[in-house]
Image (spheres, rainbow, N blue to C red):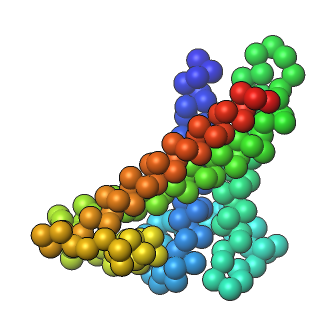
Amino acid sequence: MSRALWFLIETLGSLLATACLLRAAAMRFQLPPRNPVSQFVIAITDWLVRPLRKVLAPSRGNDWASLAAAVLIALALGLVWAVMFARGSDPKFIAVIPLAVFWLVKWAIYLVMGLVLLHAVLSWVNPQAPVAPTIEQLTRPFLAPLRRVVPLIGGVDLSPLILIVIAQVLLTLFESLFFSLVAAA
């Protein structure tokens, strides 16, 4: 029962934190606030980001309140995990911060992978979709360096595939490093 409950809590927390990261990316990459992605992300996260914005104002294109919201969600998930899986002993609160960092990096990598995958699918299926320019603007900073190095092959841009492979390798290396550090502790 606790595994199923944890799955639901982790899924909801991950989706909300990823939406906060996407909101921060939207501001960083200067997305217009009236596009469908921005409107959706703002609608989902505004209840959490708006109060934080009173303390953490945006500066130089960085949405510190959205990033802080993602961090708070990761820390809250870490606390819930520590309490739920204490196994009869004292909760391991020392694991909360490393877990939060691990989840934030994992969510950011998954966000990039998801956006790049969506961009690639839209470019093949419906490049004129209303959301396509927004996804292009979000993925351009990640794909542009690869596009300078990787040539088109038969008119096909392989940079999204290469970026997804690189992101997956980074995620695998980060997970191995994290779990080896946890095992050593």
| Of 168 and 49, the residue lying toward us | 168
Q: Quadrant of the C terminus?
A: top right
Q: Is residue 36 visible?
A: no
Q: Position of residue 18 (x, y in %)?
A: 55, 56
Q: Is residue 104 left or right of residue 54?
A: left
Q: Position of residue 115 (x, y in %)?
A: 40, 62
Q: Position of residue 42 (x, y in %)?
A: 55, 69
Q: Position of residue 135 (x, y in %)?
A: 37, 71
| Residue sticking out furthest to the top | 88
Asked which quadrant contains residue 178, the reply is top right
| Residue located at (84% from left, 36% from top) | 94
Q: Is residue 150 left or right of residue 91?
A: left
Task: State whether residue 29 is above or below residue 69.
Answer: below
| Residue located at (75% from left, 29% from top) | 184
Asked which quadrant contains residue 50, the reply is bottom right
| Of 173 and 54, the residue lying toward us | 173
Q: Quadrant of the N terminus?
A: top right
| Of 28 and 66, the residue lying toward us | 28
| Residue located at (58% from left, 62% from top) | 21
Asked which quadrant contains residue 65, the reply is bottom right
